[in-house]
Image (tube, grey):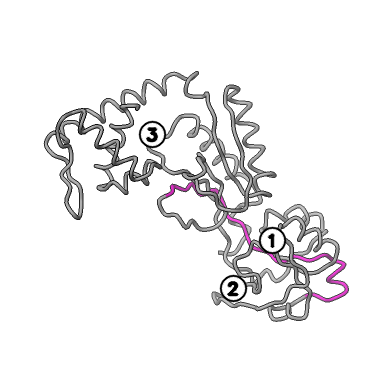
């Protein structure tokens, strides 16, 4: 057992005020935190925390240890950070949405690997929001609001939710003027949607929903967009997914005045305190690169 872990756990308990808070902060299970605290108290031979039903408080011995532990961990972190050859060696595990990861995160990973030749990166592309702790991931690219408020997020931009169709389809079926007009059109849905029978819109600050029966349903966005470009119907996609087609004219943007609020693009980690240098270097590199990416700039979309 690394005895520095015991000190880090002890300080996390003090800083968060609970065993559960420490487990969330450190990405460890609550039983593991309890075992480390018990091992530390047994080794020292005295109680370090007074436990009540509402909170934990350091004993006199715990306060003395806390001051010494912060100094020890600070010196250790400085020593490790000063050794550049050690700091920038190892593996990072990263997850990103399929299309966004392939188009925009993979080039960032490649340039990071070029910069740090002794580093390794494992990328997991998934349109599901993988759990960082359960999957052993260091960083995630998230599109949308975060359900887990314990995570630390660095925003880098926004993406819109657009309706698109091919010029050929619109020439045959006409251009919809309002969301209600979609009832007279063929629509293409993707099955990863939470509710696969409706599209939501916003106009002049008011939300509205249109219940639709899709003519075609597919389980991934590339297939839906191929069908849209082939004139099969109207699809909804995130702005970065259709940026090239809109520029080339193979798809046309529909009902821009009714688009829902844009979604945030964020880089997510479990915490920033005691972040290892290799992860901090990747985070800073990715924030810089993604913040300058034209397809996720907030100015392009209505808020």
Badge 1 is on which residue?
A: 237
Mark 3 vs mark 2, CA separation in Å: 42 Å
Q: Secondary structure at mark 1?
A: strand
The answer to which of 197 and 70 lies nearer the viewer is 197
Mark 2 vs mark 1, CA separation in Å: 16 Å
Occupied quadrant, residue 231 = bottom right
Badge 3 is on which residue?
A: 274
Rendered-image quadrant of the C terminus: bottom right
Residue 19, image x, y percentages: 28, 46
Which label sits in the foreground, 3 or 2? Answer: 3
Q: What stretch of residues is rendered in magenta?
A: 151-175
As drawn, the label of residue 202 is 2
Which label sits in the foreground, 2 or 1? Answer: 1
Position of residue 296 in the picture relative to residue 221 (left or right): left
Q: Secondary structure at mark 2?
A: strand
Residue 6, image x, y percentages: 29, 32
């Amino acid at each position: 057992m690394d005895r520095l872990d015991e000190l880090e756990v002890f300080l996390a308990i003090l800083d968060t005020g609970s065993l559960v808070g420490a487990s969330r902060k450190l990405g460890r299970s609550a039983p593991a935190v309890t075992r480390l605290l018990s091992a530390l108290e047994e080794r020292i031979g005295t109680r370090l925390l007074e436990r009540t039903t509402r909170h934990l408080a350091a004993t006199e011995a715990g306060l003395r240890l806390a001051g010494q532990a912060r100094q020890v961990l600070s010196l250790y972190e400085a020593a490790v950070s000063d050794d550049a050859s050690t700091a920038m060696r190892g593996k990072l595990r990263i997850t990103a949405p399929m299309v966004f990861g392939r188009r925009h995160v993979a080039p960032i990973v490649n340039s990071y690997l070029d910069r740090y030749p002794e580093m390794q990166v494992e990328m997991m592309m998934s349109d599901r929001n993988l759990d960082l702790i359960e999957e052993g991931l260091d960083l995630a690219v998230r599109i949308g609001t975060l359900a887990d408020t314990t995570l630390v997020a660095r925003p880098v931009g926004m993406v819109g939710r657009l309706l698109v169709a091919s010029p050929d389809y619109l020439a045959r079926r006409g251009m919809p003027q309002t969301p209600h007009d979609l009832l007279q059109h063929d629509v293409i849905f993707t099955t990863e949607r939470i509710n696969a029978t409706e599209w939501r819109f916003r106009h002049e600050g008011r939300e509205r929903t249109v219940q639709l029966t899709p003519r075609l349903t597919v389980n991934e966005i590339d297939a839906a967009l191929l069908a849209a470009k082939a004139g099969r119907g109207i699809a909804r996609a995130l702005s970065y997914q259709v940026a090239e087609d809109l520029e080339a004219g193979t798809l046309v943007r529909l009902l821009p005045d009714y688009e829902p609020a844009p979604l945030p693009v964020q880089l997510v980690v479990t915490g920033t305190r005691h972040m290892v240098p290799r992860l901090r270097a990747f985070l800073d590199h990715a924030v810089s690169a993604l913040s300058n990416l034209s397809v996720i700039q907030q100015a392009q979309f209505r808020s």
